[in-house]
Amino acid sequence: METGGNSLTAGPEGRKRVVSYFYDPEVGNYYYGQGHPMKPHRIRMAHSLIVHYGLHYKMDMFRPYPAQDNDLCRFHADDYISFLKSVCPETQHEQLRVLKRFNVGEDCPVFSGLYQFCQSYAGGSIGGAVKLNHGHSDIAINWSGGLHHAKKCEASGFCYVNDIVLAILELLKYHERVLYVDIDIHHGDGVEEAFYTTDRVMTVSFHKFGDYFPGTGDVRDLGYGKGKYYSLNVPLNDGIDDDSYLSLFKPIISKVMEVYQPGAVVLQCGADSLSGDRLGCFNLSVKGHAECVRYMRTFNVPLLLLGGGGYTIRNVARCWCYETGVAVGVEVEDKMPYNEYFEYFGPDYHLHVAPMSMENQNHRTYLDSIRERLLENLSKLQHVPSVQFQERPPDTELLEEVEEGYDSRPKARLWDGEYSDSETDEMEPKARNHDVDIADASPPSKRHVNLLTEQISKKIKQEVPSEATPVYLQINESTVKSGCQSESRDQVFG
Ligand SMILES: [Zn+2]
């Protein structure tokens, strides 16, 4: 595999980065329900590997301060957050209409501790953004974050609150432009939608497209109004391998960095794009996936690394552990150290797994044409757009102004959240206003909404790993440093 000479030890990339790592020891205890593919336990497995590889010695570790209602309401609707706060498994049947309205039930079930889970993963991402804003770290990591499908007033695709949007809003207090890059196999629809009409955030999503959740992310969707050309979509087919993926990722990201010059970058590292994922259909190795992190790191721009999807949990843990190594500048050994979850990683007990032999349905001509098209779109992008500094209000007002912008974005962009028949696989959502408004856009692509969980039944069932009984990891409080003392939003532990 071509790794592009981004060695961790040579050249400017070899410089040590200060890395802040956010981890909540409770996260592995949240449980979406029997058979549900989203397992927060994978975060605990990744953390265990990280600790047993000794990577925690090379970074500052923080337990996230739980995001509060007002933090979450910077993006989300008040009534949606109130609902998440009050709903519980025992009484949910009393409010079926509300559940349906907020798209909570199937993909996004009500489970015990749901709101605390949201507070925790959002708190980690916002806390990471604060660390970067204050120059306390070069890279911040929150593997429990990256829940990119959540909408302003709607849960979607296993995501309830959109920690990414919240973290980007935090970064916008200090940075004129923020770049969002998404390597989850699913389109980063919630983040794209939130920033579709602004040039202050550029979103770039690499994803499987065509009869696949969430149905958005057509190459023709570019952004709207002031945000035109500031949304970039890279639609891909089944079986993409490392070389093909990086042959798009590197030139596109290189061009984006050149023309957009962001002050901070958020990289969503969804691991369902790995080979052998329970819901995915790509063929990336851990090294290929991590090469995106390594490449992003070479630009020396404050970097927030977030998790996301990932449903073959042993591989998710492998991937995020290895990528933590990339962040701190350590090439971790393939042979795994003994850890609490060792039995998951048999029979080889290695960090890296070989890609599968499957057809790569992304042929050279397709890759070339999509690259050419996207680079052409990027050439239309105004070099380094900037907000007028003299007009820039203080932090809090800036935030309100940004939020106001979202409220006035075309309302029909949001799915109406009501599935006419929850048993149907797919249905056509309403067209979005701007699809019609963009004068030179091609006709709106055919969109499908389907439930992420329903894709499990379409996938080979082989993939259900035999999971060990969850073990409650004993976190030594001294390893989770008290931190962020100087910052208003972080709580001191220990
Ligand atoms: Zn995904």
Image: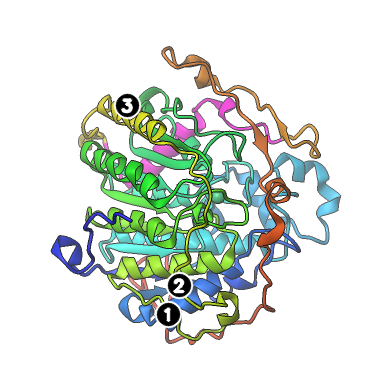
- Pointer 2: what residue? 351
Q: Is 401 within the magenta? A: yes
Give the extent of the magenta segment: 392-417
Residue found at the very far left of the displayed protein: 11
**In the image, which disc is placed on residue 442?**
none
Q: Nearer the viewer, residue 342 or 493?
A: 342
Q: Residue furthest top?
A: 439
Give amino acid for label 3.
Asn
Give coordinates of residue 277: x percent, y percent.
Answer: 57, 57
Q: Looking at the picture, how far across and down is residue 218, in whole percent?
A: 49, 30
Mark carried by residue 377: 3
Query: Can residue 87 be seen in the rendering of this structure?
Result: yes
The disc, 2 or 1, on the residue closer to the chain's N-terminal end is 1
Residue 335's mark? Answer: 1
Q: Nearer the viewer, residue 383 or 428?
A: 428
Residue type at the position of mark 2? Leu
Looking at marks 2 and 3 on the same chain, the residue that comes earlier in the sequence is marked by 2
CA–CA distance in space, label 1 to label 3: 44 Å
